[in-house]
Amino acid sequence: MPIQNIQLNVADVARSVAFYRDFIAAVPVGQPTDERAVLDVVTATIELVKLDSPTESTWTSDDLQRGFRHIGFKVSGLDALAARLHEAGVPFHLEPLEAEGEVRITFFYDPDGALLELVERDLKYNTVVDEELVAAEYALGVPDRPRFDHIALTVDDFEATKEHYRPFDFRHHGTILQPHDPRGFRIDYLKGGDTVLEVFTYQTEKELRTPQTDAPGYVAARLRGAPVGDPAVGEGADGTIYADPDGFTYTVGA
């Protein structure tokens, strides 16, 4: 089953709508208000919720912090889009470059500090675990506009994470190795529908972050299914928010 929706806490809904419209080609679903907006990003929606009294976020860009890492979009014309982002003064985390898996990527921040990735071209996996799922991924083709592709998270134990998300019908389809990273870094991919959980693991010490639901940026992803025994950590626009053993937060829906 796919990731259906991603809730982000924002300081100014209109500002964030303009950002995602101008740079991600997101399309409003219904009429945005000062308090809330829902944006179509092809394979999911992004829900922007105004946060009047935010708590300072403890999220950092260090991928050794477990839990949510970034939101990824498949694009064509990555360099042209990156140039537009630069012209608008958008802060970058990583300039465009060629990455493992024969893709071109770049990372930048939205107005409230959520880390976003653009990915150009299909991944060429070091290990294909499920050929049918990889074929389904390739069949999506080159997007006409940026398409939500994945949420990345850092975990302590990939095998445990794979089993944890099996009830939501996410299946392991491929692996990308990072042989030049001294931290023992690898990425495994769990596909659900047309969306993916991109799972980072490291053979070094990692930090466990206490989930926050009242800070700017990422709040939760809605997964289709039923709760799997994770603790509730708050309430969001999509209902009860749960946190998995690595602190990754999600809601559940039909």
Image (spheres, helix red, strand yellow):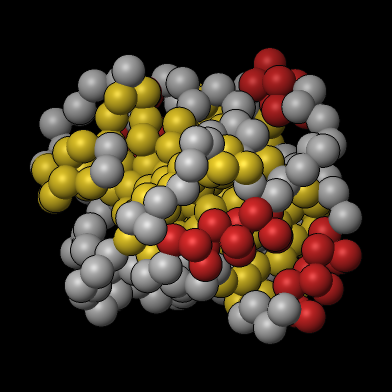
Residue beneath the point at 38% across and 58% down: 34
Number of labelled discs?
Answer: 0
Residue 130 or 213: which is nearer the viewer?
213
**Nearest to the observer: residue 145 or residue 93:** 145
Question: Is there any visible trace of residue 189 in the rendered image?
Answer: no
**Residue 117 visible from this viewpoint:** yes
Residue 46 falls left or right of residue 117: left
Front in this rendered view, residue 11 or 190: 11
In the image: residue 64, left or right of residue 41 = left
Give the quadrant of the C terminus.
top left
Residue 92: which quarter of the image? Answer: bottom right
Q: Is residue 166 left or right of residue 147?
A: left
Percent x, y of residue 9 = 35, 60
Instruction: Give x and y (percent) for residue 182.
Output: 57, 73
Q: How far across and down, in percent of the image, does residue 13 sit?
A: 44, 61
The residue depicted at 70 percent of the width and 59 percent of the height is 22
Indicate whether 225 appears above or below 229. above
Residue found at x 20% / y 27%: 227
Percent position of residue 183, x then y = 51, 70
